[in-house]
Image (cartoon, helix red, strand yellow):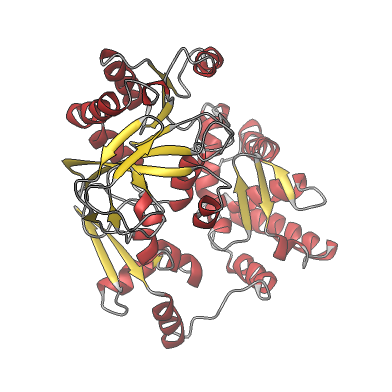
Amino acid sequence: MVDAMKKKIVAEANVCRIETNLDLSHIRFNGKDYINADLEKSICVKSRNELIADVLYNYFSEGKAGQLQGVVFCVNTNHAQEMERILNVKGLSAKAYTRKTKNPDEVMQQFREKKIRFLCACEMISEGWDYPELGILVMARPTLSKVLYMQQVGRGLRRTNTKTNVFVIDVVDEYGAMAKPCSMHSIFSNPFYTAFGSILKRDYSVGDMIEVDGLHETVERIVQVDIETFEEKYGDYLNQEQLAREFYLSTGTITSWVTKGKISPDEMITFGSRKIYLFAPEHVKQIREENNIPEHTEETIKTDFFDFLEERDYSLSYKMPFLLSFLKNMNEIGDAKIDNVLTDYIAFYQDRIDKGLPVDRSSCPYNAERLKDRKYIKSNMLTNPFEKFERKRFLYYSKDLNVISMNHALFIKMSKQDFEKVKMQMEEDLEKYYGSL
């Protein structure tokens, strides 16, 4: 991206940092990004929203700068609606643009016709959206994800004959030392901040004049900022969930090992009663060697799959009808429409009810009424048993494509006889399982 800006392939970014005194050090994160529920509870603060509106009004309400259009990236619908209200009070025309917007096409048309200056967006235009003349980006939704941050910034980087620059406004809150969100300065590894200065430039001097798109700003100070993000520092570390998947163990086993002192994390992050343990790549290798944990690779995946089935770990019946339903609907490339899998999965249990047979053990929540709720059964099926196959990388679920897929490395190793062997085992295990109830 730096090279693209230097070569003038994309628009050059001029950055403003809005520093708030909002303490968000308590915001939890899952090792990759902030927990959205926590953000929703904490970000929608009136003083923070008004501070953003004040900066937009003070710098982008008159002259050429006052004609620029922008997007405010928000946390959720309520945040977007509140930003819409505050900006309109300031005389800056704005509309919330979220999945709950009743007339999204009309709102977007008004924006393209320049009847609206600011879209307050949530989840709608991070990617796959193009409006070349976009001149202002307000990063009001903090994220640890470099991918998400760059998807959002990318909406404004289109360079045209009339647009050579874009303003990026980073909203910088107070976070703990561990979980600093992405910013333009961290993404571009530029530790020197000058208000509205080019993100590429590191040699500003006090007294320099910055003139961009009708905005005139004299450099009054140059501030050194912390540019090391959580992703840069710990991006290749594994948390306890990821370590468990890497070792084909349960997360509870890893947590127990840490509690008992069998293994020690390289970093521990505490949020109330919850702890996230982080393990460095070289430490992961050491733990594997010390505990004689075999490596599970694409070369071993077929053996791993059959070893998993051979365990016959059936606390409930779920795995067996699920795998049979998946295999029945799997096509020639190893994909199965989840709705078809779900239909056959439900049909298995409905057939038992129709025949007056026990659905499962008493702890199973399935009954005639519950089986009518496809949404519930789908959620339950994805949690258990699908997750048992997914965590060992045998199966994947694509929500966008609405398919469950067998890992290609496993699929290409499986013969017709192998699939018949799996089907036969599942049918035999079902008979034994229900025979023992």
Looking at the image, residue 358 sits to the left or right of residue 403; the answer is left
Residue 189 or residue 350, whichever sits in front: 189
Residue 244 or residue 186, whichever sits in front: 186
Looking at the image, residue 179 sits to the left or right of residue 321; the answer is left
Q: Write the residue at 58% across / 58% down.
A: 389
Residue 387 or residue 111, whichever sits in front: 111
- Can residue 367 be seen by looking at this rendering? no
Q: Write the residue at 41% across / 63% down.
A: 235
- Can residue 286 be seen by looking at this rendering? yes
Res 242 quadrant in image: bottom left
Looking at the image, residue 63 sits to the left or right of residue 146; the answer is left
Q: Position of residue 320 (x, y in %)?
A: 63, 53
Q: Position of residue 385 (x, y in %)?
A: 55, 51
Q: Write the residue at 31% across / 23% down.
A: 83
Q: Position of residue 6 (x, y in %)?
A: 51, 54
Q: Write the residue at 29% across / 21% down.
A: 82
Q: Is residue 198 above or below residue 250?
A: above
Q: Is residue 410 above or below residue 198?
A: below
Q: Is residue 422 above or below residue 183?
A: below
